[in-house]
Amino acid sequence: MSGTRRAGTERGREGGTRTFLIRRLTTLLVLTAAAVTALFAAYYGVSRNTTAVSERSTPAILQVAAAIDALHVANARAELSLDGPTTDVEGLGEDYRNELSTANQSLAQAVKSTTGGKAARQSLLTTAGLVSSYSDIIEQAYVNRGNEDLRDAYLGYATAMLTRDHDGVLARLGTVQEGQQRVLRAQTSFGWLLGFAWWVLVPALFGTLAVLLWLTQRYLRHRFRRRVNPWLAAATALLLAVIPLAFFTHHMQGRLDQARSTLSRTNIGSNGGETAEEVADTMRDTHWRAGAVGWIPLGGAVVAALILVGLQPRIDEYRFQPR
């Protein structure tokens, strides 16, 4: 009778061990999936913006800024040419035409690369048409240079086309530029969602997973009399990869902040080439760090596989099903 009771107790203990191990395996795999997903989202939230700032926002912002600066200079050159004593000989001057050409080229490129969306693109197309009209009016001012009143009327109307507060060319470009700066701030901002992910969610999930793996190791050591489970130990060690990824994120965010500061300067229109080069230098060593995002799912799959290989043989040792 006592032998039967002991056998029943042993079967119950074995069945309980198997159930515990299956539940623990399921919990570890689910927690691994959650932790890796959170890490991927948090890292991607920063890394994806390095390419967006370098390849889209920077050229778009610089092109609009260059157009604004060139139109300011072109109008000043036109006024000087029309009022100068050599107007009959030199015409409107090479400087005016060069600046106007720069403005037109910058607008054409800005239409292709603007980050402000459909509304900004449409505004730039309208602005390009207004710049063409402005050029025609300046030409009329030159044609009528002998009639001072008519020349000044044409020049005043052309200047008004550029400088009107709400619907002038420069006002339209300023509105586009403000939209581009808003996009840039969104791309370079470490918002509350990313802050929550990096400061709360990722540490909590990875910390819980590490503790649970350690507790599982302790349980296996006590139950199976084995000092260490190498598979679970390797899975635990692999979790430390989150530390360099956190440092990479800090580095990329710092470079994004620096790029935003550079593109927020007031003189970027006249120094577009230098500014573009400075931003490129700032963002250059972020690209390989951004590429690390592709390793996160792979690392998660390896951790899950190590956990499965570490626990499944122990589960298979308890295939006894109580009657």
Image (spheres, rainbow, N blue to C red):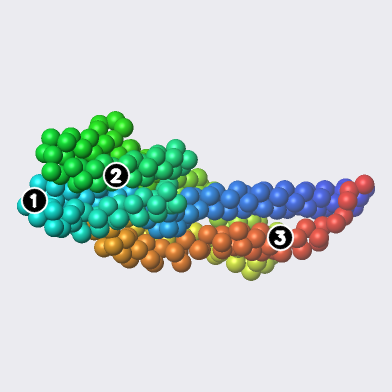
| Residue 263 seen from this side | no
Identified at 42% across, 48% down, the residue is 111
Q: Residue furthest front?
A: 146
User: Which SS class for mark 3?
Assistant: helix
**Residue that badge 2 annotates:** 136
Identified at 64% across, 56% down, the residue is 216
* Disc 3/disc 1 C-alpha distance (Å): 85 Å
**Residue that badge 1 annotates:** 84
What residue type is disc 2 on?
Answer: Asp
Q: Is residue 95 above or below residue 230?
A: above
Name which of mark 1 and mark 2 comes first in the sequence. Answer: 1
Q: Which mark is residue 308?
A: 3
Q: Quadrant of residue 96?
A: bottom left
Q: Is residue 237 above or below residue 200?
A: below
What residue type is disc 1 on?
Answer: Gly
Q: Which mark is residue 152?
A: none
Q: What percent of the width, then of the height, locates residue 43?
A: 49, 54
